[in-house]
Image (cartoon, helix red, strand yellow):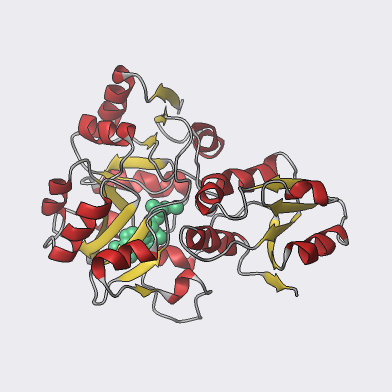
Amino acid sequence: MKTQLLDANKAEDIQAAGEILRSGGLVAIPTETVYGLAANALDGKSVEKIFKAKGRPQDNPLIVHIAAEEDITPLVQLFPETAKRLAKAYWPGPLTMILPKSEKIPPQVSAGLDTVAIRFPSHPAAQAVIHAAGVPLAAPSANLSGKPSPTTAAHVLEDMDGKIEAVLDGGSCAVGVESTVVTLAQTPPRLLRPGGITLDQLRAVLGRVDLDPAVMNPLQAGAKVSSPGMKYKHYSPKANVVIVDAPFEAYCQYVNSHKEPGVAALCYSGEDSALQVPAICYGEETDYAQQARELFDALRKLDDDLKAKTVYARCPQPEDVGLAVYNRLIRAAGFEVIHLE
Ligand code: AMP
Ligand code: MG
């Protein structure tokens, strides 16, 4: 299949994307979080193509994207007061809510669960494509399963060229990590995946919100999984990533005493000059939003530009949007952390 490159700034390309989606094809679309691989969410056969193109495990459910708050109503059993308050505060935006699903949601979308994940993205091109398609769009991140999520159209093409009908190029994604996922299908609500909307922002609207243990920790064998996506090794470059939890001096010493071929560093902006190995920076130490925006591109560069075999990464602070950065990087590292004084 030849993958068409469409331009998100051209009205006729938005219409072309809508047409492909209406007729059952796949289009990678820009959103404010990462690029999504979209299909008609109401058609199980179209949705199956997403799993095939990504190599995604069948038991990992998809997020359904809508372009108006009221479009949630037919997709869920009920739209509770708590969800309405969250929607008022943070929709459109990088927040996904999980609710009991209606019979309109095909089993392929929810991977057999009785709940569905819904998001109203703020990116104008994402909204325009949903309108053009005339249906809600199921869209996981547009990467091959296991690889870092794509934050540019070029990243999408690296993984999906020849496998999908089109990529709609809308430039770089503003948030850079996937949406915050909160489940309202249980009480108290629970944060399943951190993202651009923080735990404090959720608590400001909902009061008590629990943090799922899988956000920070590896899943214990046999434990019940609230969010199937947490089970899988994720966001991984080919290189072996190791997080070094240490003050900067100790980090530098550690990295510089390991300067062997294939060793690289993933550090904060400006720190590379103190390191004696090739390094990629992923934002200022105190700017969590910038770290989120740059992380996935940095992970891809470690493979593609540096051909790194082992990467020693600075440890993100697990607070505010930094919690999302920590959650992604610790999975990229397969939970391998070295602690130094
Ligand atoms: P992605 O779209 O690739 O960012 O992945 C979607 C994430 O949302 C995965 O981590 C899923 O496990 C999670 N998710 C989607 N639907 C549900 C659901 N019904 N219950 C729990 N988690 C869900
Ligand atoms: Mg994903």
Q: Residue 150, how many percent across, how many down? A: 50, 42
Q: Nearer the viewer, residue 327 or 288?
A: 288
User: Residue sitting at 14 percent across and 59 percent down?
Assistant: 102
Q: Residue 297, how many percent across, how many down? A: 58, 43
Q: Is residue 256 above or below residue 279?
A: below
Q: Where the N terminus falls, by quadrant?
A: top left
Q: In this rendering, would 234 be left or right of 14?
A: right
User: Residue sitting at 19 percent across and 39 percent down?
Assistant: 135
User: Residue sitting at 26 percent across and 31 percent down?
Assistant: 128
Q: Residue 198, how many percent across, how many down? A: 39, 60
Q: Nearer the viewer, residue 23 or 213?
A: 213
The picture quadrant where one finds residue 82 is bottom left
Q: Residue 233, how many percent across, how many down? A: 54, 62
Residue 106 makes an appearance in the image? no
The picture quadrant where one finds residue 223 is bottom left
Q: Nearer the viewer, residue 166 or 246?
A: 246
Q: Where the C terminus falls, by quadrant?
A: bottom right
User: Residue sitting at 31 percent across and 41 percent down?
Assistant: 122
Q: Nearer the viewer, residue 159 or 200?
A: 200
Q: In this rendering, would 10 be left or right of 55?
A: left
Residue 194 makes an appearance in the image? yes
Q: How many marks?
A: 0
